[in-house]
Image (cartoon, rainbow, N blue to C red):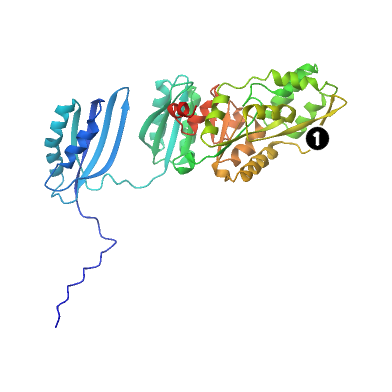
Amino acid sequence: MTDRAAAPAPTDPTAAPPTSDGALLTVTGSDRPGVTAALFAALAQVGPHPVEVLDVEQVVVHGQLVLGVVVGSPESGSVGSLADRLRAAVAEVASRTGVAVSVQPTAAGSARQERTARHHVIVLGRPVPPAAVAGAARAIAGVGGNIEAIRRLSDYPVTSFELTVSGAASTELRTALATVAAETGTDIAVEQVGLARRGKRLIVLDVDSTLVRGEVIDELAARAGRAAEVARITAAAMNGELDFEESLRARVAVLAGLPVGVLDEVRAHLVLTPGARTLIRTLQRLGFRCGIVSGGFTQITDPLAAELGLDFAAANTLEVADGRLTGGLVGEVVDRAGKARALARFAAQHGVPLDQTVAVGDGANDLDMLNAAGLGIAFNAKPFVRDQAHAALNQPYLDAVLQVLGFTRDEVLDAS
């Protein structure tokens, strides 16, 4: 009778992992080449059982290194024994590199954290006062959140910091931080952590008071001698107090009789919002499709889109007869709903899902577009709009949108 080797016992998937002890190593001091290599080389020599790396995080702040490493040893005997063996190993590293290395024992499995809701909180200002960071930290803690990491995104034209936060619900976090932003005069945006944040591929910008300073129709009305009247209607429409199409037709009517050459004059005097060219150039080089959707006029926006090399543009068209404006419009009106339709149309044309789009605007007629996009940003917007957008920016620089998207100043410079 032939002997057969006993089959291995089946693995119980519900069984707890084998016990192990662990340790947290914290390295601090002046940064210099070779510190990280020296530390991990020393860890590789620790015996008698092998050591595995469970977690690592390193940051250098103005030349000062902070490095945290969590290690474990599945075959070690009891909690604390690995830490004791590591202290001797890292003492030589500290002596040779001039850094300080502390070692603390950790409980088995402490490096493996449960998945919880995580968000990026971006704090922007010029400058960012300590009270803003303190207020944000208190607000985060107040809704049960924990700050896992902080990094600087930019120091120019605005200072911005990104906080990675776990354990807080989106709505409560946004509400708490909105209060801090209002009290400290800073901008605070909240986005969920995930691949979708860096998966954005298309951006749509409003034109008047977003891509360019001021309102084109107000400039045209000034040349018709009706500036004050039109400005009042414009303000009411942007605040959501009037139906946009109704207000647009009322404003356009007062332009009747203006020579068409006035459009060229107004277009020549347009002033781009600071940072507009940087935003568009950077996103284009990062592979974004960029365009504009405006409640203004194609006679203004089409040449602007061509000048900036944009991929698409949508706006209303002023009716012209015998070289003069008639006071009417031609074709479909691009109103609040029309802007959202234009965003969806452009996204479909370029094969970009809506959740990978960004929309930026300032008025009530932008709200459908802002809410339809994967990320809607209210830029120097009316309170009515800020309260309903995904994020709000009150800085005078349009390229601050890049920091809301998570791009650092160095990445912007690299893309220039």
Which residue matches tag 1? 330
For residue 263, side relative to residue 103 (left or right): right
Is residue 406 or residue 144 the one in the foreground? 406
For image coordinates 52% across by 33% down, the residue present is: 285
- Say which quadrant the N terminus sits in: bottom left
Q: In which quarter of the image is residue 268?
A: top right
For residue 250, side relative to residue 283 (left or right): right
Could you tell me residue 183's position as x and y percent? 48, 23
Is residue 159 or residue 201 the one in the foreground? 201
Q: Quadrant of residue 111?
A: top left
- Total numbered badges shown on the rendered structure: 1
For image coordinates 47% across by 39% down, the residue present is: 198
Could you tell me residue 84's position as x and y percent? 12, 40
For residue 386, side relative to residue 58 (left or right): right
For image coordinates 12% across by 40% down, the residue present is: 85
- Residue 50 in sight: yes
Question: Would you place residue 326 above or below residue 18 in this image?
Answer: above
Could you tell me residue 195's position as x and y percent? 45, 43
Amino acid found under the numbered disc labelled 1: Val
